[in-house]
Amino acid sequence: MAKSSTPRRIRRRMSNQKKAKRQQYKRRGDTLFRKAFEFCQECDADVSLTVRLRNNGQIVMFNSDDRWHPSPQDLAVYYPVPLKVTWQELAAKYDP
């Protein structure tokens, strides 16, 4: 099956109700961290994920290996050079 060159569309199913929004945030966060966990298990990779919620400033962190939590200074001298993916790049790839 050939891959399509069109960007993948993300469906937005956000409600205006407070309870529904809270449930959606919870589900998406749970999925994000579950996928990070699965990736480190199935792909033999170290995963470090940090999420800061804009509305209340809460920071949630996942790190698959306590010995590997890179600082920006550590990553500056890392080889091969880490890939930096920006929000704009992801938006161009996934937003309609």
Image (cartoon, grey):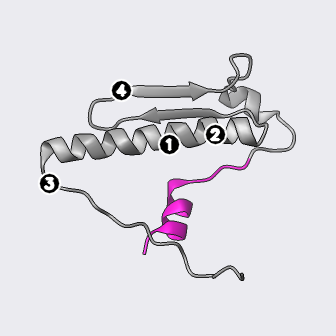
User: Which of marks 1 and 3 precedes in the sequence?
Assistant: 3
Instruction: Give the vertical position of 15 relative to 52 (above or below).
Output: below
Per the rendered image, the range of residues in magenta is 83-96
* Residue located at (73% from left, 22% from top): 68
90 within the magenta span: yes
Quadrant (top left/top right/bottom left/bottom right) for the C terminus: bottom left
What type is the residue that disc 4 sits on? Gln
- The residue carrying mark 2 is 38
- The residue carrying mark 1 is 32
* Residue located at (71% from left, 35% from top): 41
Labelled pair 3, 1 in contact (Cβ < 8 Å)? no
Q: What mark, if any, has residue 23 been given in the picture?
A: none
Left or right position of 87 against 38: left
* Residue located at (27% from left, 37% from top): 55
Q: What mark, if any, has residue 58 been given in the picture?
A: 4
* Residue located at (50% from left, 67% from top): 94
What SS does tag 4 mark?
A: loop
What type is the residue that disc 3 sits on? Asn
- The residue carrying mark 3 is 16
